[in-house]
Image: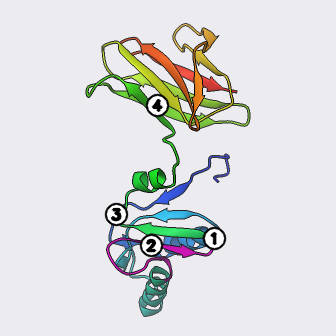
Amino acid sequence: VLPDGTAYRIVSLVPHSAVGLAALRHLSELVGQGVTLVGPRPSRPFSLTGGPSSEAEFRELCDKLWGEGPQGERRVGKGRVIWGRTSREVLQADRIPEDFSWTGGDRETSIDFIRRHTDQAGIYFVANGKNRREAVTLRFRTTGLAPEIWDPVTGSRRDATEFRFRDGVTEIPYPMDPEEAFFVIFR
């Protein structure tokens, strides 16, 4: 959980052979406190600072966090380390729905989003990236709260009248106009 209240289910490492020792120490601390770390075992420290003693500490931390082999999972403290799978695969295996998705449309459909969460509301900005109408059902990983649609161009807002809660998400059937963008507010 970050100072602003944003919470993450996993920390994902970029596939890179080098990681700084200070970063590796911090990751080890986070995993011990319950974080799920997803990513490959680094093969070397990012810096030459510290000489042989820092290289030894780096290897010890890697041994503690990662096991052997191209793929695996290891419990460390209250957390776990997973390598050889993508973050998406881990979230799906943990049955955590995507934060936002849609059904309908076709291979050309391009809908994007940004999410922000405050103490009072969950806020999604949703945008149709194509210059064509899209008949889609928007899916938000939020339940139990009534969605409102806010139009940033006109300043209007209205309650979403057609929505349903299913499998841990809120579904809103929504025919998006070409290049339409709007906010969906849950509170």
Residue 105 percent coordinates (x, y): 33, 22
Magenta segment, which residues? Answer: 64-78
Marked residue nearer the N-terminal end (1 or 3): 3
Identity, as a three-letter code, of the amino acid under mark 3 = Pro
**Label 1 secondary element:** loop
Which residue corresponds to the image point at 38% horizontal and 57% vertical from the top-left?
Answer: 86
Which residue corresponds to the image point at 52% horizontal and 57% vertical from the top-left?
Answer: 10
Measured Cα–Cα span from mark 1 to mark 3: 24 Å
Q: Is residue 164 above or below residue 54?
A: above
Foreground disc of the pair 4, 2:
4
Q: Tell me the tag on residue 78.
A: 1
Measured Cα–Cα span from mark 2 to mark 1: 23 Å
Q: Residue furthest bottom?
A: 52
Measured Cα–Cα span from mark 4 to mark 1: 32 Å
Determine whether, in the image, residue 41 is placed left or right of residue 7. Answer: left
Mark 2 highlights which residue?
A: 20
Foreground disc of the pair 1, 3:
1
Identity, as a three-letter code, of the amino acid under mark 4 = Phe
Label 2 close to label 3 by CB (< 8 Å)? no
Q: Is residue 107 magenta?
A: no
Quadrant position of residue 163: top right
Mark 3 highlights which residue?
A: 15
Mark 4 highlights which residue?
A: 113
